[in-house]
Image (tube, rainbow, N blue to C red):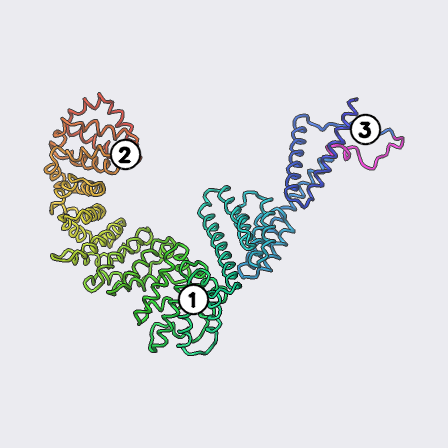
Amino acid sequence: MSADDRALETFLRDVDEIAKIVQDLTSADASCQANAFFQADKRLALLKETEDVEGCRTKLDRTVINSSPSGSLPHSRSEHSQGGFLSHLEKDAKERAERREENRTLANALKDLGNEAFVRGDYEAAVQRYSEGMDKLKDMPALYTNRAQAYIKLERYANAVTDCEWALKCNEQCIKAYVHMGRAYLGLKDYTEARKCYKKMIEINSNQENLAKVYLNQVDSQERQDQQEQKALEEFEAGEEGAVSVTELLQKISKANQIALYYSGGIKLLTEAVKDCTGQTLFRTNSGFSIIGDNKVINRSLVPAQRDPMNADLCLSVLTLWQTVCDGNEENQRLLISHPSVNKKTLTLLSSETPEIQSKTLALLRVYSMTENGRTLLLRHLEPSKLLQSLLGYARLQDARASDAMVLLHSLTLEERLKIHFRTNFPSASLPLFTHLLRNVKTLNRAVLPRCIGVMGNLSGDGDIRKQMAGYAECWDACLSTVDECSLPGVGPDYRDILFAVLGLMVNLSLEVNPAIQARAVEISDRCMSLLSSKDGGILTRSVGILSRILPQCTAAVENTVQAGVVKKLIKLLKAGGQRTSLYAVRALAVCSKQDTRARKDMMKYDKRFSILVSLLRSEDEMMVGNAALCLGNCFEIPAAASSLLQSDILKLLLTHAGGDAKKNTVQQNAAIALGKLCTAEPRYMNHLRELHGIEILNSCMKYMK
């Protein structure tokens, strides 16, 4: 084959490939279209590279293949050449890129209009806008996932699945597509496929595991619900007595305008009939929540103030029924708490004038508090601030209601949702109520007060909530009042638990630095000093913990505690051991020895040759080591302090920590400072330091001194 023939063959092959690219650029298949863009860009880049290297395009000698005597051609040679064709394609690609950018802008605008319609609840309009966006740009995943979400709202689940599949063709890593596809399959009751979608989320991004678990739990819950309803239907169709009686009783109760006694008796019989999951399911599927919740006579009985005994009896019957149908049944719990007439009345019934109604309301809420899903439902549908305030008020009562309320409140305060709700604005009424409770220990239920204080301690574990609580001056005053009340001679053992709880709350609140604490630092430290004589290990530990956090905020508090003999007491605690107590104690000593000369002298006096502090340098706890080194460094400023350690291995210990690889830079810093003060106070250490190459190590520690 001649060179001209080979050139012609190459040219024709290129024309075929380019024609294929042009055809694919207009394809409805997004992936095919994307590949065509890639191939076109690749050819244009190759052409440019050829031009840069050779300076010109390869030309074909037309005299070989065009021997027509007319010599006339419809187009010029350059237009028929490969270079001319690609030049035309390059121009076309630029125009397409410009059109695509215009279409992208239009598609985004239509997507925003669709989003606005979705938020308004006009899902049909949303579908229309997203569809118009797709006409402009077919490979935008957000258009498909958003339209799928609108289809789900319209219960057009199959359409939603298809849209999610198209979104994944555009981007196979699109997690939003798997989320909505899972929801669509859930709507189609295809639980296997729904689980696959949510598990795929974790495969794509392991950080989505918690979210995927929430969705998987929803699948499990929905599947259980369907199974329950199928079983209930089978039993009803089989004519089983229990199943039939539930439906018959609901029909009788659905009669309007009957007297309270009629409904009360019917509801009691219905409660007896709802013995198991089948009864609970039949109650739900036969509109039980609407029949009870929408009944005007029944609703009039659900009020805090009860003047008519028959209405009070009806209210109790309804609460008992709700508790029965919701016990262990998540779907029933959801339907009840989301019913408009129920979630508004539940909080008011907590403040009922009738103790039995209060107890039944608490029992109903306890059903919800047993599971994470139930607690979430409570916090979503009831006002958390009012719920907290209502339950705190039960601490005044002297019976089981107080205990039930605190158990319920304790479970709720462990939920992150509640803490998030209170972060920006802790209930203004709750702190005054809580401080009032603390100031009236004698009149409260002392058996439940520790749990009540513990609830506030749980909330103070959140930094934003703690800042609000710690800045509330009256809260500190109430805590000090409680400490005084519980420290009186001859008080009973129940006061010890209250004291222990309030000290725990104070430990948490003292993490903050604010004027309310600083203004009371002397009073707080005085109370803690008096408790350091306690023989109760828990009380001792928390008292020292408060001291270690309060003393750095107030010089006057340091002076007072040192004069009161705090160093001697803290050294005694260090001798007794106890990891947490020792950690708090050495930190308090570090603060005192840094600010007060007398404290340094007392440390020399009560810790001969610093044997306790030196032993702490061998601890595996870096915080312990760092504070022990700081204490020693402060004490080396006292004459003869450094000389008393000449026979010890203090130099080697400090050098090890100064040149070590501690995670906390403050450990190396404190050790290096102590080492420098040691050698300055006692020159005889210098020779040994040089032998151990300590000068070089100290130089390397300079970066921690900045």
Tell me where residue 66 appears, x and y as whole percent.
84, 29
- From the image, tell me which residue sits under label 2: 705
Q: Could you tell me which secondary element the residue under label 2 belongs to?
A: loop
Tell me the distance, in whole angstroms, between the alpha carbons under discs 1 and 2: 77 Å
Q: Residues within 10 Å of mark 1 (few under 14, many from 20)?
A: many
The residue that disc 1 covers is 273
* Residue 456 position within the rendered picture, expressed as x and y whole percent measured from the top left: 29, 56
Residue 77 lies in the magenta stretch: yes
Residue 587 is tagged as none
**Residue 124 point in image, percent of width and height:** 60, 60
Q: Which contiguous range is marked in magenta?
A: 68-84
Q: Amino acid at mark 1?
A: Ala
User: In this figure, which residue is indicated by the disc labeled 3?
Assistant: 62
- Using a 10 Å C-alpha cutoff, classify the residue at mark 3 as few (fewer than 14 neighbours), some (14 to 19) or many (20 or more): few
In the image, 66: left or right of 233? right
Relative to 590, does residue 110 appear above or below in the rendering?
Answer: below
Q: Is residue 403 left or right of residue 482?
A: right
Gap in Å between the C-alphas at discs 1 and 3? 98 Å
User: For the residues marked 2 and 3, what is the alpha-carbon distance in whole angstroms?
Assistant: 82 Å
Q: Answer whether labels 2 and 3 touch (C-beta < 8 Å).
A: no
In-front residue for pair 221/597: 221
Residue 375 screen position, x and y as percent: 39, 57
Q: Secondary structure at mark 1?
A: helix
> Residue lying furthest top in this view?
691
- Within 10 angstroms of label 2, few (less than 14), some, or many (20 or more) residues? few
Mark 1 or mark 2: which is in front? 1
